[in-house]
Image: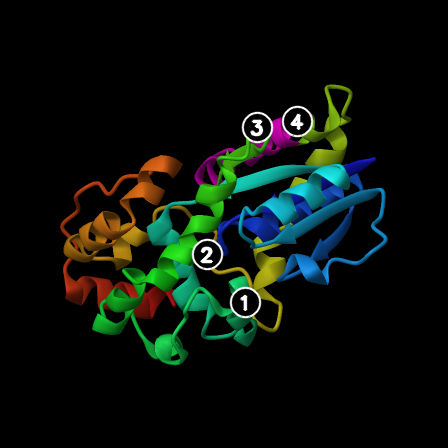
Amino acid sequence: MTRIAIISTPRSGNTWVRSVLAHALTLEEIAVHNPRDIQDVLPQRLILQVHWYREPNFQAFLRNEGFQVLVLRRHPLDVLLSVLSFVQREPGVARWLEGNTGLPAGLAKLTPVSPEFAAYATSFGAENLLSVSYQWCHEPEAVTARFEDLVEAPGEGFAKLVRAFSGQSFDDSLLEGALEIDWLKVYQDTPNRHGWHGKAGLWRQLITPNLAWRIYRRHRLVFDALGYGVPLNLLTSRAAERNWQRLA
């Protein structure tokens, strides 16, 4: 039996990682918004994706069903930007944490230099959204991976994950086949264009230094626990606006 549960903050690369591991390890895939939506009878070989709190009942369910937990970490500023892009095409984000992310209805019309985006990025709702990976990184036996490392060296990064869940006897050719698929194009071609740019560090082109520091100070516990900082850059609001129009 192989059961993996990817439990991370939304827009941290969850769907990409789920797809690669499912193909490489021949696992069935299930994605739900709430643990209560998980079916009663589960496949023996399964990879589950859900954004949910680290709470005792869910932890007990995962242990009883033999799940290994995988937590993805991504720079919180890149997460917030990816959310800003994604909400323009996917109304289902309202079910993230069953509404506790507090995503405002008008967020889809905003840019990263708008006061409204700054207000959301420093809100309690954003704290909830960013806290999923933070909470599950404290799970004693969880496997963790950085989005940035997987983007930079997918062969090496996914090989580590595959071996963590399957042992050393894994056939590398299966992973090679999974990585040959252009997953970004696959997800960009979906109705909600689930894939955006699939890059790390876009926040340096889109979030001004003052706002970056405001967000960092507001969510410092999450940034520090996940291992991310906010290096100084000289981006102006005008340049950020131009970059957003080009990238969005």
Q: Which residue is mark 3?
A: 156
Q: Give the class, few, some or many, for how many residues have Cα within 10 Å of label 2's Cα (few <14, many ≥20).
A: few
What's the magenta bit mostly, secondary-structure-wise? helix
Q: Give the class, few, some or many, for how many residues have Cα within 10 Å of label 1's Cα (few <14, many ≥20).
A: few
Q: Quadrant of the N terminus?
A: top right
Residue 62, by quadrant, is top right
Left or right: where 243 falls relative to 151:
left
Q: Give the class, few, some or many, for how many residues have Cα within 10 Å of label 3's Cα (few <14, many ≥20).
A: few
Residue 98 is labelled as: 1
Residue 53 is labelled as: none
Q: Which residue is mark 2?
A: 197
- Ranked by sequence position, the earlier of labels 3 and 2 is 3
Q: Quadrant of the C terminus?
A: bottom left
Kindly check if marks 2 and 1 are in contact, taking CB atoms under 8 A apart as contact.
no
Q: Residue at x 53, y 64 (%)?
A: 96
Alpha carbon of mark 4 to alpha carbon of mark 3: how far? 12 Å
Q: In terms of depth relative to the viewer, which is nearer, 149 or 213?
A: 213
Alpha carbon of mark 3 to alpha carbon of mark 2: how far? 21 Å
* Range shown magenta: 148-161
Please say if 79 is above or below 241: above
Under mark 3, the amino acid is Glu
Find residue 164 and report its horizontal and vertical position in percent. Answer: 66, 27
Please say if 49 is above or below 100: above
